[in-house]
Image (cartoon, rainbow, N blue to C red):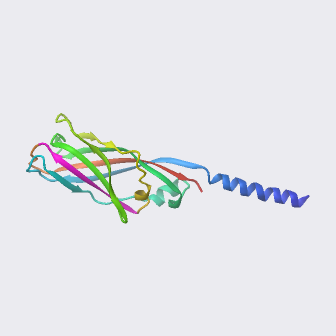
Amino acid sequence: MKKIYLAFGLISMILLNSCHLDEKIAFNLDFNNEAKIPSIIGVNLPIEIPIPAITTNMSKELSANNSKIEYLNTAFLKELTITSKDPKDQDLDFTKKIELYIKADGLKEIKIAEKLDISDAINTELNLDVFDDKDLSAYIKKDKFELKIKTTSRKILLHSTKVNIYTKFKVTADIF
């Protein structure tokens, strides 16, 4: 009889532990990064603006949520906002079009957001249209990833402008 209880206990533990792997967590991962848009002399000329690499700290984030990097399932971009920071009164009305790309070591560069035909009445904040159907988990799993802005101006910008790029990713992972 003891053997039956012992076998039942072992089977129960195995089943409970394997069911635990089916549990998932979902959380938002926010990043803020700054870039400098240089003065723009030409109108309707596209320029590329590299943004310093973003360190993900995914192992730490997942550990805090009872998961590990190898259990990360998906990461979808949910929000991307560009805000003018310096000079303080600089609107983003000089932009005609903005595209944002992501890349990481060993992964190709892909477009993740854009805003086309930007109104010349725009103020200091611009919400881009995100491609929220692209799973970016391979990029988020890396220690670092890079963003790049491609913009086309509608008018001359005589001074450089510092902008903040805010990104929000929705991440899902298995719990261990």
Determine the residue located farthest toward the right in the rendered image. Answer: 1
Query: In this picture, is 26 found above or below 60?
Result: above
Kindly indicate the quadrant of the structure image that contains residue 13.
bottom right
Position of 133 with respect to 5 (left or right) is left
x, y percent for residue 100: 28, 50
Query: In this picture, is 99 found above or below 52?
Result: above
Residue at 24% over, 41% down: 116
x, y percent for residue 139: 40, 58
x, y percent for residue 138: 43, 58
Quadrant including the N terminus: bottom right
Q: Is residue 146 magenta?
A: yes
Residue at 28% over, 59% down: 52
Q: Is residue 124 magenta?
A: no
- Return the residue nearer the eye: 115 or 50: 115
Q: Which residues are magenta?
A: 143-154
Position of 94 with respect to 173 (left or right) is left
Determine the residue located farthest toward the bottom in the rendered image. Answer: 106
- Return the residue nearer the eye: 42 or 145: 42
Residue at 33% over, 45% down: 80
x, y percent for residue 160: 14, 51
